[in-house]
Amino acid sequence: MNTKTIAVILIALGIVVLAYSGITFKTPGKPVDFLGVHIETTHSHFIPPVVGALALVGGIVLLVVSPKKD
C-alpha cells in the first residue's frame, strides 16, 4: 500500500471514531468451567475519541507530506 491509501484509511477511521464519540467492541475471552457449568466470557474494549483525532491528524499529515510523483 502506498502512503496516500494509508492516509485515506486513517482519515476515514478517524472520522468514524469521532462521529461516534468513541467505539466500543467486544472480543471473546477465556471460557470458564466451574462446577460443571460452562461460562463464556467477553472482554470489552473502548477506542476513545482522542485516538480518532490522532488518526485524523496523522492521515492529513501523511497526505500533505507524502512524496509527489512527477
Image: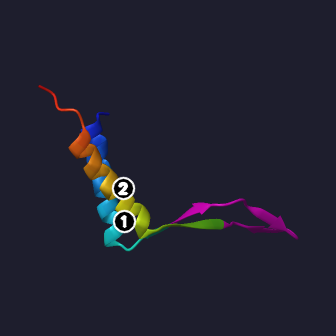
The question of residue 18 being in magenta is answered with no
Which numbered circle lies on residue 38?
A: none
Q: Quadrant of residue 33?
A: bottom right
The numbered mark, 2 or 1, whose residue comes first in the sequence reads: 1
Q: CA distance from mark 2 to mark 1?
A: 9 Å
Q: Are marks 2 and 1 in contact (CB under 8 Å)?
A: yes
Question: In the structure shown, which secondary structural element does the residue marked by tag 2 occupy?
Answer: helix
Q: Is residue 6 above or below residue 54?
A: above
Residue stretch in magenta: 25-41
Q: Furthest residue to the right? A: 35
The x, y position of residue 55, in whole percent, is: 36, 56
Report the residue marked by disc 1. 17
State the image coordinates of residue 60 (x, y, percent, origin top left). 26, 51
Left of 24 or right of it: where is 44?
right
Write down the residue under mark 2.
Answer: 55
Per the image, label 1 sits on a secondary structure element best described as: helix
In the rendered image, which quarter contains the C terminus? top left
Tell me the residue at 41%/69% (across/down). Answer: 49
User: At label 1, which amino acid type do we have?
Assistant: Val
Place of residue 19 in the rendered image (x, y in percent of width and height, measured from the top left) = 31, 71
Residue 1 in the figure: left or right of residue 63: right
The count of marks equals 2
- Quadrant including the N terminus: top left
Q: Residue furthest left?
A: 70
At horizontal 29% and vertical 37% (from top left) the residue drawn is 3
